[in-house]
Image (spheres, helix red, strand yellow):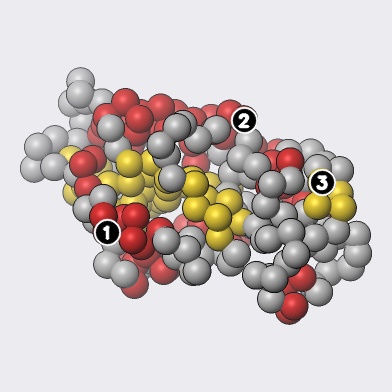
Amino acid sequence: MLLLDAQPEPVRFEPATTALILIDMQRDFLEPGGFGEMLGNDVSLLRSTIAPCKALLVAARGVGMMVIHTREGHRPDLADAPPAKISRGHPPRRIGEVGPMGRILIRGEPGHGIIPELAPAPGEPVIDKPGKGAFYQTDLALILANGGIQSLIVCGVTTEVCVHTTVREANDRGFKCIVPADAVGSYFPEFQQAALAMITAQGGIFGWVSDSTRILAALSPSSAGLSSIA
Ligand code: C5J
């Protein structure tokens, strides 16, 4: 059992019963020309998460931790997209419209894909989700139950939308959620700060916030820090 320095207090986790989940690290959100930038956002605010996510991904693979990737997106016929979702905003900045990376947030289109820096390895589950939360209308809960998973390290974008929704869903299902602050990103710095504060408020109402450096130290066999057999 490892002990990780985190807010609001240190948290114990076991790599064998923990999954690293990378939320929606998709080209549409992170790359210039994608949906996020079409909406007027500065994608560099999200791109700073790539290196910490990559470091955690390499470490998780190194210790044999379960790794799960998610993608937000819809069927090409939009049958799984609520009208209230696709009618939001103005054409051509709508889900299903044709953008520089193909149809926006449509499965199989270039923009829907995970950025090459964090490409899933063979055998790592990729969860295609039609909503913001990774548990909604997916088989994530089944995969985690079958893998004996009790804790999640939740990375990805965007902090206050799909990361937060997933953390809330997971917390209600009894998972310990650890969020590395530098491996989650928002287009809005004030939302990033507020979303992280909401997780740790009231004694950790949704989970724990740490960072990639402390998690890497905890996972490192040579670590002499807080991480230890507890
Ligand atoms: C958004 C997400 N922001 N992955 N999706 O629409 O957070």
- Three-letter amino acid code of the residue under disc 1: Ala
Please tell me whether mark 3 sits on a helix, a strand or a loop: strand
The residue that label 3 is drawn on is: 102
Please tell me whether mark 2 sits on a helix, a strand or a loop: helix
How far separated are the C-alphas under marks 2 and 1? Answer: 29 Å
Task: Please indicate whether residue 154 sits to the left or right of residue 33 in the image.
Answer: left
Compare marks 2 and 3 and give the one earlier in the sequence.
Answer: 3
Q: Ligand 1 closer than 8 Å to the CB at disc 2?
A: no
The residue that label 1 is drawn on is: 145
Q: Residue at x 89, y 68 (%)?
A: 90
Q: Ligand 1 closer than 8 Å to the CB at disc 1?
A: no
Q: Quadrant of residue 55?
A: top left
Dot 1 crowding, Cα within 10 Å, few <14, some 14–19, many 20+: few
- Where residue 28 appears, x then y in whole percent? 72, 47
How far separated are the C-alphas under marks 3 and 1? Answer: 35 Å
Task: Please indicate whether residue 87 sits to the left or right of residue 162 in the image.
Answer: right
- Three-letter amino acid code of the residue under disc 3: Gly
Q: Can residue 49 be spotted in the picture? A: yes
The residue that label 2 is drawn on is: 116
Compare marks 3 and 1 and give the one earlier in the sequence.
Answer: 3
Q: Quadrant of the C terminus?
A: top left
Between 51 and 35, the residue placed more toward the observer is 35
Q: Residue at x 22, y 47 (%)?
A: 17
